[in-house]
């Protein structure tokens, strides 16, 4: 039996649920941002920065950032355990994914609160 | 369905000499499998594509100049347009396939016929969205 110590929540059911919860957050954000860009074809910097200065947008965006981390980790973890059979290679790939995911979240937080 | 034979003790056992075809190249991918693997492929593309999105996000909120730079690149540079089209296309596919997945979680499209139909619909809807996004970008 494989001990799934590197999955996100250490339980398949928890991962399954988190993948869906994060998917819903990500899809709502996708629809919102694409809708916003479509409806504001002449978007200005002032409008754009005012959007991300609003508290609700920061909450929504931070939620999305965390969802990106959770969702991509569970997805890439599943893919790596399916296709990368050598432990060393898989560990390296998962480490790289974990690092990238952490960089993305930190970068996003910095952009949001660095205004 | 399963081949049985009687072993020397008179017990029914599954006949292990059933034909096995593991030559992947000779097995044609069912449409459902194609849709599934594309869900994974687009997921990986999105993870890599995020680097470009974060870069543009950072630059666009950094200053007026940065914002202008992003807008300008997306309006004039073919490479920038192509990259954002690629990422948004992957997103559209992944989005549609994800919604199909959620429907399957609650019990729809699980039969052979409905499953294949949903997989085809997934491809068609994603293709339309990708075209629309292309028109929007160019």
Image (cartoon, coloured by chain):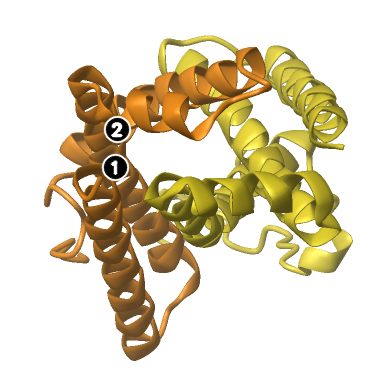
Examine the rendered structure and indicate whether residue B73 appears above or below residue B121. below
Give me the residue at 77% from left, 24% from top: B129
Q: In the rendered structure, the residue with mark 2 lies on which chain?
A: A
Query: Which chain is displayed in orange in the rendered image?
Result: A
Residue A57 seen: yes
Secondary structure under tag 1 reads: helix
Q: For the residues labelled 2 and 1, say whether their Cβ atoms are less than 8 Å apart.
A: yes
Residue B53 seen: no
Give me the residue at 53% from left, 62% from top: B48
- Residue A58 lies in what quarter of the image? top left
Q: Position of residue B22 (x, y in %)?
A: 71, 67
Give me the residue at 29% from left, 81% from top: A91
The front one of B53 and B41 is B53
Give me the residue at 32% from left, 30% from top: A52
Drawing shade for chain B:
yellow
Q: Which mark is residue A65?
A: 1
Q: In the rendered structure, the residue with mark 1 lies on which chain?
A: A
Say few, some or many: other residues with alpha carbon within 10 Å of mark 2 (under 14 / 14 to 19 / 20 or more): some
Examine the rendered structure and indicate whether residue B102 appears above or below residue A106. above
Q: Does residue A3 appear to the left or right of B111 in the view shown?
A: left
The front one of A74 and B6 is A74
Say few, some or many: other residues with alpha carbon within 10 Å of mark 1 (under 14 / 14 to 19 / 20 or more): many
């Amino acid at each position: 039996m494989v001990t799934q110590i590197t999955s996100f929540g250490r339980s398949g059911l928890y991962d399954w649920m988190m993948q869906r919860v994060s998917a819903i957050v990500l899809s709502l954000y996708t629809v919102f941002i694409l809708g916003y860009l479509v409806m504001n074809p002449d978007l200005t910097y002032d409008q754009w920065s005012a959007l991300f200065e609003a508290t609700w947008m920061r909450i929504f965006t931070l939620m999305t950032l965390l969802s990106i981390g959770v969702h991509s980790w569970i997805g890439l973890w599943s893919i790596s355990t399916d296709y990368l059979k050598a432990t060393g290679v898989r560990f390296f790939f998962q480490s790289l994914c974990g690092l990238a995911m952490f960089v993305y979240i930190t970068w996003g937080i910095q952009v949001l609160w660095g205004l | 369905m399963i081949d049985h034979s009687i072993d020397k003790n008179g017990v029914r056992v599954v006949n292990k000499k059933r034909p096995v075809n593991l030559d992947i190249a000779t097995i044609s991918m069912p449409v459902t499998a194609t849709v599934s693997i594309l869900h994974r492929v687009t997921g990986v593309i999105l993870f890599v594509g995020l680097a470009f999105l974060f870069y543009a996000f950072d630059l666009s909120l950094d200053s007026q100049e940065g914002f202008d730079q992003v807008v300008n690149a997306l309006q004039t540079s073919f490479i920038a347009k192509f990259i954002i089209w690629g990422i948004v296309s992957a997103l559209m596919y992944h989005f549609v396939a994800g919604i199909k997945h959620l429907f399957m979680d609650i019990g729809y499209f699980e039969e052979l016929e409905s499953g294949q139909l949903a997989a085809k619909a997934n491809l068609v809807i994603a293709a339309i969205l990708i075209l629309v996004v292309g028109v929007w970008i160019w």
